[in-house]
Image (tube, rainbow, N blue to C red):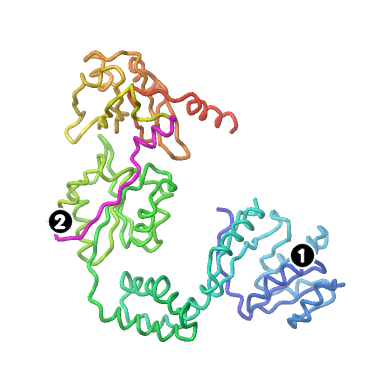
Amino acid sequence: MQHFPIFLDLQDRAVAIAGCGEFAVAKLRLLLKTQARITVYATEPEADLLAVINAHAVSLIRRPATADDLHGAALAYAAHGEAEADAQFAARARSVGVLVNVVDNLEASAFITPAIVDRDPVTIAIGTEGAAPVLARAIKADLEEKLPQGLGPLARAGKLFRPHAEALPQGRRRREFWADYYFETGPQVLAEVGEELLEHALHDILRRHLAAEDSQGRVDLVGAGPGDPELMTQRARRLLDRADVVIHDRLVPAAILELARREAQFIAVGKEGFGPSTPQDQINAEMIEHAQNGAHVVRLKGGDASVFGRLDEETQALTEAGVDWAVTPGITAASAAAAAIGRSLTQRGRNSDLRILTAHDIDGFADHDWRSLTRPGSVAAIYMGKRAARFLQGRLLMHGADGATPVTLVENASRPDQRIITSRLDRLTADLSDAAPTGPVLTLFGLAPAKAAAALPALIEELA
């Protein structure tokens, strides 16, 4: 992120615009939404600019701005549309420490003005680092259509009421009060009787929430999916947005954690096969302690919570502690890996069953019914098989598996750095060693990539 988004207080602060034509008009119309003291420096203002200036009693100075003129200004806009005039104005602004924006010149600008959706006091700013202003405008148009005009009155009434809401303790109870107002009672009152009764509605909602008993904490055990935030369920995203505490696995990427509230408490409880891990008892204790203190806890697990996620141990601990809980499923890594290679995990005439295995358990490498996997057409999705590859290869070959059986390894399934490694059983350890994957790997035994899917990584690499 090169440009840090921030909302600047311009009330009664000086802002300078230099220019005579359409660029200056555009900036002036935008800044008239603020409470800034605007001065336009224009030697020969065009008719459209002069009309806006006169209609809003904006200060006009019919000469170029000097450095002394600009001293103390909050912002300055070089809007001549002429390189030399803009450069001179920008240099004077910079000489007195004023942030300057040069229209259509990203490199010369200290800041950029985003596309804005205005539902005063709700304001949404959309920026593309100056790379794609057309895209920013398209996003703005989409939001303008979706966001109701009533957001402004709701937010204004809520802003005035904030001191009263402090009667509720900070945290979950206060958030529930505001959620009730903004998403349920407030819009209903606004639609049925109008803005003038919003304050009365707010007092009613507050009395109701003050009279309510403290809500009990709870735990939602949520599958985060294989790593792509777009593959999360809508319910998972809603729960993550509401969480007070997020207890997350090592494999949950930062892009998904970013979906949680900034004020949430994040607790990493990483687990790695044959590596450092947080004891399960400690994870259970963290969930129970925070929930019993009234927090909404999201126990965020990679993939699906019910697939090799020790879900039963956690729900049993929560039940024994009297903590309310629920499970939200997610897309498991096996499904994401199969999608990555364009293959189905089951196919009529090929395999009538599917084995989902873990390569190791709490005691080390895991043993299975290897002979059943050696039957022609058998398919298995093997979790945590990277370090156990030699063990898996040896067991399968020992029990009669064909060395030519296809094996596909999908590293970081569904993520931007996804990689597909094609192999066969008799070459598995050698190919894995050559590929040296560093991310989590899902091993698909008995499946080779579809041709189009296999060609995609090479095409992407070539285009890059």
Q: Are marks 2 and 1 in contact (CB under 8 Å)?
A: no
What residue sits 37% from the left and 24% below the top?
Answer: 447
Label 1: how many residues lie within 10 Å, few (<14), some (14-19) or many (20+)? some
Q: Which residue is mark 1?
A: 23
Left or right: 313, with 424 as reference point: left
Where does residue 381 sit, x and y in percent of width and height? 31, 30
Left or right: 368, with 250 as reference point: left
Q: Which amino acid, mark 2?
A: Thr
The quadrant holding residue 267 is bottom left
Where does residue 444 sit, x and y in percent of width and height? 34, 27
Where does residue 235 sit, x and y in percent of width and height? 36, 55
Question: Residue 164 colored magenta?
Answer: no
Mark 2 → mark 1, Cα distance in angstroms: 65 Å
Q: Which residue is mark 2?
A: 319
Q: Residue 226, labelled with which disc?
A: none
What residue sits 53% from the left and 27% below the top?
Answer: 458
Q: Is residue 117 above or below residue 32?
A: above
Q: Which amino acid, mark 1?
A: Phe
> Which region of the structure is painted magenta?
319-342
Label 2: how many residues lie within 10 Å, few (<14), some (14-19) or many (20+)? few
What is the secondary structure assignment of the residue under circle 1? helix
Where does residue 75 sit, x and y in percent of width and height? 67, 70
